[in-house]
Image (cartoon, rainbow, N blue to C red):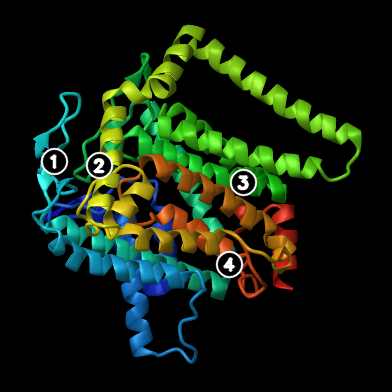
Amino acid sequence: MELYPAGLLALGIWLLVALRDGDRALLAAVVVMPLGMLAAIKVPIGGFTPPVAQLFAAGAIALALAMRVARPAPTGLQLPSAAIPLILFSLWGVFSAIVLVRLFSGELMVFSMSRGHIGARISPFFPSGLVELRPSASNISQTAYMLLSTAFFIALADLIRRRGIAPVVTALRWAAGINILLALLDAAALDAVLEIVRTASYVLHNEHTVAGVPRVIGGFSEAAPFGAYSAVIGAFFLVRGYDAQDHRDLSLGIANLLLAAVALSSTAIFGLLVLGLFIAVRRLRRLAVPMPQERAVGTVLAAVLASLVAVTLVTVVIGADQVLEILDRLIFSKGSSASGLERGALASHGLGVLWDTYGLGAGIGSVRANGWTVAIAASTGIIGLTLMVVFLVMAFTTRHRRAIPPALVPDRAGAQAAGLVSGSVALISAFNAYPDFAILIFAAIAIGSLGRQGAAAAPPRPAFLRTAQNDRDHASATV
């Protein structure tokens, strides 16, 4: 077991917060998500170093459970209906990690999730190889992460039910600001400063370039997770800020989306394209509603001009040749790169595992497959995939739009945009079979935006985060 001073200091600060307010202890996990490489401890089982966001969430949940045991609440924990399929997914995942991996042990060859298991190479273009399916430490660790994600969603949804969406949005503002700060430090090549928060035992890719242009990774280990996170949180604040006419949120959204672009990651670019499609569909729906012709024409012209200005600025700053080379390497030739070939092999073999296990899956933590859908199917089979789809549909969609208070419409729209971007990015890049914290945060916000019970007790925002529109929204949400 190894301990890291910076991570321990963060845990100490978190403990001081947790002793005063259990809800803030949980929200701290949201705030530190941009610190993707900050760890406090190296776990002996498998040598894993969980980031502090997961440690904060686990500690907050354990504290809440202890408080409920010591002082039982007059009313039990009220679960949102969307939590039911997620809980069932977790129970099936536990069963798969205990039973299914042993049922098919020795009968399949898989890409292992355990570190150090290189296996028999199947291609000279990438190092990953096949190993015989056996129970391993990754079955334990991945199951623990899955259960933590489920508990985190339930706890966050309960917090929103009691205190409203505002505290979570405030935590996300801090996270967005921290993400910008870390990106600026990385862009300025201040690695000596960032080494303080880069304690996790991940391979650090902080010197990669694309067509001679350095990639920005912020507080993460590489460009892909940084770009994906920036796109997701940028999508939330862009849509929410625009709908609420909140210029500060809008600025946070634009800044994080720019960071997603400069990460020079295929994953981030795909997320930006999905966000653009989401915005385009929303605008087209609004244009279908009768409105003055001048406003309709102005909306279209503004979108076209903004796109032309952005393309022109990028071309002038970087150069036309480099822009074309970057696009070629990240998009057009991605499939023939070593990374693209490896991801393709992981995806196709994951589907093969689903077939070979008769649609049951090989167990959580047993198979490394690329793409969230394939990873879920290979690990938990058709049952797990169905339950996850049901959870996402229940969390992000509703048949009764009138159930959404007007003041919470921007929150729901932003959560839907962020959830769509997060899910789309996971479909092409995720290796884990369980949902990550990002999509669960926005699922909880989307659920909390339904009905007035989620906004009834929303506390006032700190003065430095307020705008006139914020105050009007908060007042209407708390009447």
| Mark 3 element type | helix
Q: Amino acid type of disc 2?
A: His
| Residue 9: x %, y % from top left | 27, 56
Q: Residue 36, how many percent across, how many down?
A: 33, 46
Viewer-side residue, 42 vs 305: 305
- Contact between marks 2 and 4 (CB within 8 A): the answer is no
Mark 4 to mark 3: distance in Å? Answer: 19 Å
Labels 3 and 1: the sequence-earlier one: 1
Of the numbered discs 4 and 3, the one sitting upstream in the chain is 3
Dot 1, how many residues are within 10 Å of its Cα: few (below 14), some (14-19), or many (20+)? some
Q: Which mark is residue 448?
A: 4
Residue positioned 26% across, 35% down in the render: 345
Q: Earlier in the sequence, mark 4 or mark 1?
A: 1
Give the quarter of the image for residue 15.
bottom left
Label 4 CA crowd tier, 10 Å (few <14, some 14–19, many 20+) = many
Name the kind of residue labelled 3 in the image: Asp
The circle on residue 130 is: 1
Residue placed under numbered mark 2 in the picture? 349
On the rendered image, what quadrant is the N terminus found in? bottom left
Which type of secondary structure does the marked residue at label 4 adopt? helix
The reply to whether residue 66 is in sight is yes
Q: Is residue 21 visible?
A: no
Among numbered discs 2 and 4, the one appearing first in the sequence: 2
Tags 4 and 3 in contact by the CB under 8 Å rule?
no
Marks 1/2 in contact by CB < 8 Å: the verdict is: yes
